[in-house]
Amino acid sequence: MRFEVLDLGFVRYAEGWRCQLRLHAEIAAGLRAPTLVLCEHPRTLTLGRTADRTHVLRDDAWLRRHRFDVHAVERGGDVTYHGPGQLVGYPLFPVGRRVRSFLETLGEAIVEVAQSYGLPARFELDPAGVWIANDKLCAFGVAVRDRVAFHGFALNVATALDDFSAIVPCGLHGRGVTSLSAAVGEVVAVADARDRTVDALHRTFASWDAGATGRPEAACLA
């Protein structure tokens, strides 16, 4: 499958969300090619359809004081964090009912990116994410409407990991978070990770067939 790439740069979550929904509608209507939207967001918490608000560990006053935006969204899963230094990808791809395969293919691409930096990463489906040991490197969470996926993945590249202290990511206790920079031991540029991610996604989705059937599932992005 061939897809276009649209890099929005650094945008507020609401702006990226509106752009994502507009493009999704065009793709679902057959008016636009599948599109990978890439961006970075300022500090943001998003709560999926099944989110437990107690997994947000700071009160509203603290979140406002530290300039966190908060949004309830359509994807599956619990609460997640976005912030500077994190590569966010919204692959608006035709999925049909193959959500599991879609997540596995996304995971394969991110594992390939991590391995390109010499990191021993692995993908886990439930909850969906790419992990290094006990620490989550990249989170996934998607929704499917009119057979086209939206939302996607959040790859920690040079993310301020202390910001995750505001939440229990995906409601998981006893597991941590990491970034490419923390795992490599030096700062990794978001632009470099972006280029490697686009290349990996082109490879892993080269033979993607959205026409096959399968059971629809949702996963946590956190």
Image (spheres, rainbow, N blue to C red):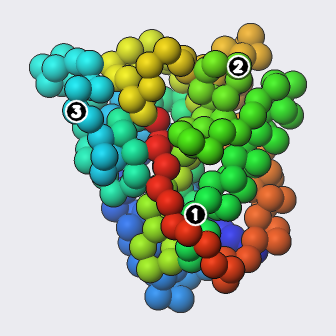
Q: Amino acid at mark 3?
A: Arg
Q: CA distance from mark 2 to mark 3?
A: 27 Å
Disc 1: which residue: 99
Disc 2: which residue: 133
| Residue 144 located left or right of residue 17 | right
- 73 or 82: which is nearer to us? 73
x then y, percent, for residue 216: 51, 67
Disc 3: which residue: 53
For marks 2 and 1, the one nearer the N-term is 1
Q: Residue at x 66, y 69 (%)?
A: 4
Q: Is residue 78 above or below residue 213?
A: above
Q: CA distance from mark 1 to mark 3?
A: 26 Å
**Where the N terminus falls, by quadrant?**
bottom right
The furthest residue to the front: 215
Q: Is residue 191 visible?
A: no
x then y, percent, for residue 13: 35, 46
| Residue 222 located left or right of residue 215 | left
- 4 or 52: which is nearer to us? 52
Q: Residue at x 86, y 34 (%)?
A: 116
x then y, percent, for residue 100: 61, 59
Tell me which corner region of the image, top left, top right, bottom left or bottom right, holds residue 136: top right
Evaluate if marks 2 and 1 touch, with contact meaning CB atoms under 8 Å apart: no
Q: Is residue 29 above or below residue 46?
A: below
Query: Helix or strand or loop: what does disc 2 sit on?
Result: loop
Q: Is residue 143 visible?
A: yes
Q: Residue at x 71, y 23 (%)?
A: 132
- 218 or 117: which is nearer to us? 218
Q: Is residue 26 above or below residue 87?
A: below
Q: Amino acid at mark 1?
A: Val
- Mark 1, other Cα within 10 Å: few <14 / some 14–19 / many ≥20: many
- Mark 3, other Cα within 10 Å: few <14 / some 14–19 / many ≥20: few
